Image (cartoon, rainbow, N blue to C red):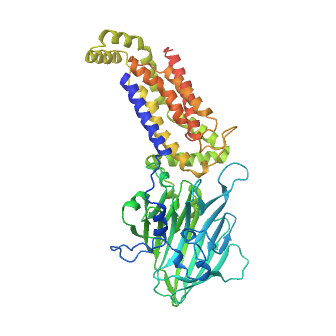
Amino acid sequence: MEQRNLLLAVVLSVGILWIWSALFPAPEEATVDHTQMVTTDSSSAPSVPSAPRSMPELRATAEDIASASVAKTSSASGQGDGGNHQRYTVNNDLLRLSMDERGWLTDAELLDYTEGIEPGAANVHVLGEKTLENSTETRASYVNTGVVNARIATPFSRIDSSDSKQEARFQAVLDNGMVWQRTLRMTPGSYLVNIEDRIVEGAGMKMFRQVVQRNPDKSLNTFYEHIGATGFLDGELKKVDYDDLDEQKPVQMAALGGWTAMMDRYFITALIGDANRSYQYFYKGDGLSYQSGVLDDGVVEQGDAIFHSTLFIGPKSIPLLKSMDLGLERSVDFGWFAFIAKPMHEFMLWLYDYVHNFGWAIIILVLSIKLIFFYPTHKAYGSMAGMRKLQPELVRLKDLHGNDRQRMSQEMMGLYKKNKVNPMGGCLPIIIQIPVFFALYKVLLMSIEMRQAPFVLWIQDLSVQDPYFILPVVMGASMFIQQKLNPQPTDPMQAKVLQFLPPVFTVMFLFFPSGLVLYWVVNNVLSIAQQWYVMKINKAL
């Protein structure tokens, strides 16, 4: 009995601490100073000797544009999208995209998503640059494109006279005299951007595209949640960690079709390949800047080199991504418990269509799980009732044989057998809860549908902690009541350890998503009701 209680406490505690470490990872120490940041950004990274063909430079530099208009830009602004660059904008009803005269996509604003729930909150910018708080450093993300073995001599300028906001044509001149033409196209109701690059009379030339993150917050990438470079190549999800790129050579992979991307928890910028063409994908980094890119051989059309690309910049919404049939839904990785999390996520989305509130969907989910496991849980609580009725006899055995552990164990097993009680029968309720707990945690953590999803009253975002800590306190109280209903250990030390669990778990749950705490509270309340009923009919109270 004592071993069972202690085992359950340890298993559940380790599980909660596992999530805790994922939520609050230790910050990483910077390994490169500011001097190196400026130096590496103004020079080209060496190509990989073993590569089948040359890799693009680590990232484009200010030297890529030699015109006077670009020369006036400071070297610091050349690292990102800052400075005096001319910007051009295309947009539809969902996405506003900015391109500068270098051909870099330097800003992508999502018009249906905001940074916070407060009125007037700014829209989410998936691409862009910002200065870190209390620092002169900047964090930036952008998409740049380059022609292999060539540079821009004359910057991009818009050449079409159309007033269309969803399509624009541009032109630049390379240092070899060839003309580079670009067309950006967007369609209403879509986060896809179609890009066509044409090098006039440039047959045989090659191009690279890459999504770049400069000075990212690498501590967000944990063993429980992948952030950063990602790809879906040859039917397999590839997750490349920042640390791997810091310590190893650039990663190259050849694949038919597929996509490569940089992503965070809720949003992704992905370069999508043609399903019928083969590409060489690459991932690079130097501790400060990281690239997820693709080399494209293009096609030849009347002597011109044509490069078609599709870019997705938007939310990681599984229904949306599935509807495009590009494999982008694989970017939402539910981890080890995906076999539970995926149907749970789909069930909650289905419920949301009827109740229009994810909080109520979570409550209905708990009720459904309780109904599915009602019979085995009922049997488990019956075993616990039997154990509770044997409590006085167990105390007597401990007084008689407490110093003889072997005799004590023999007498206890004889007592269990005589009364047809399974001492491990009470494990089932917690064993069932643990995988569901982790699966729901991933659903709440990874699903953009849960982001800023309100419940009732003070709970206005189920994906973040309860602002007033009411739910965690209620959860702790329910856990305390459950302990009182459970058979008590005869070992005083173990009894004291178990008494500390409700306050310890309450403190840990203070910072968990309120949706997860809501699940746990409702589950505990229903469990208490069922357990009390079983104890009552078995006369164990």
Q: Which quadrant of the figure has residue 189?
A: bottom right
Query: Residue at the location (39% across, 74% down)?
Result: 47
- The foreground one among 247 and 222 is 247
- The foreground one among 443 and 476 is 476
- The answer to whether residue 487 is above or below residue 121 is above
- The answer to whether residue 101 is above or below residue 81 is below
- In this picture, residue 252 sits left or right of residue 225: left
Q: Which quadrant of the figure has residue 126?
A: bottom right
Instruction: Judge whether residue 229 can be spotted in this image.
Output: yes
Q: Where does the image place residue 390, in percent across and percent down from the top left?
A: 41, 14
Quadrant position of the N terminus in the picture: top left
- The answer to whether residue 481 is above or below residue 342 is above
- In this picture, residue 519 sits left or right of residue 5: right
Query: Residue at the location (31% across, 16% down)?
Result: 414
What is the number of callouts on the image? 0
Q: Where does the image place residue 284, in percent across and percent down from the top left?
A: 43, 66
- In this picture, residue 199 sits left or right of residue 185: left
Q: Where does the image place residue 51, in percent across and percent down from the top left?
A: 35, 74
- The answer to whether residue 425 is above or below residue 319 is above
Instruction: Judge whether residue 241 can be spotted in this image.
Output: no
- The foreground one among 308 and 324 is 308
Q: Where does the image place residue 127, in percent across and percent down from the top left?
A: 59, 64
